[in-house]
Amino acid sequence: MVLVRAFQGRLPSELSGRGVKYAEREATEEIRDTTATALEGLEVAYRELATRVEALEEAPLEDDEAHAPEEGERE
C-alpha cells in the first residue's frame, strides 16, 4: 500500500511499529504547490543565466597584452 500511495505522490510522514502515518492531504498539496512554484523560479533563473553565459561566450575577447602589466610593474 505504501508503494501505491508513493506512486500517487503521497509519502508517509511517519513509520512506526504501529503503522504508517500520512500527512493531511491539504498539507501535502500545499507543499507540492510551493515546491512547483520554487522549481519554476529556478527554471527561469537557469534560462536567464544560460542566456548571459552564451552572451559572454560570444563577446569578443579583449587584447590581453594591452592590459598586461609592464615588466617590473606589479598589480
Image (cartoon, rainbow, N blue to C red):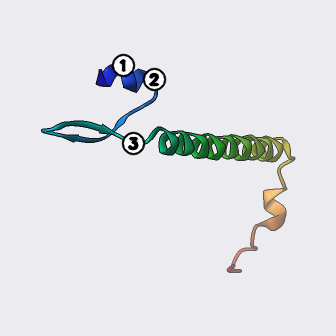
* CB within 8 Å, label 1 to label 2: yes
Which of the 4 image quadrants contains residue 73?
Answer: bottom right
* Residue that badge 3 annotates: 23
- Residue 50 image label: none
6 w.r.t. 44: above or below: above
Q: Do labels 2 and 3 touch, CB within 8 Å?
A: no
Q: Which residue is mark 1?
A: 4
Alpha-carbon distance for marks 1 and 2?
A: 6 Å
Please give the label number shown on residue 8.
Answer: 2
* Rendered residue at 59%/46% (across/down): 34
Q: Residue furthest left?
A: 17
Q: Position of residue 24 (x, y in %)?
A: 43, 42
- Say which element carries label 3: loop
Please, what is the three-letter code of the amino acid marked with disc 2? Gln
On screen, residue 31 above or below 69: above
Circle 1: element type: helix
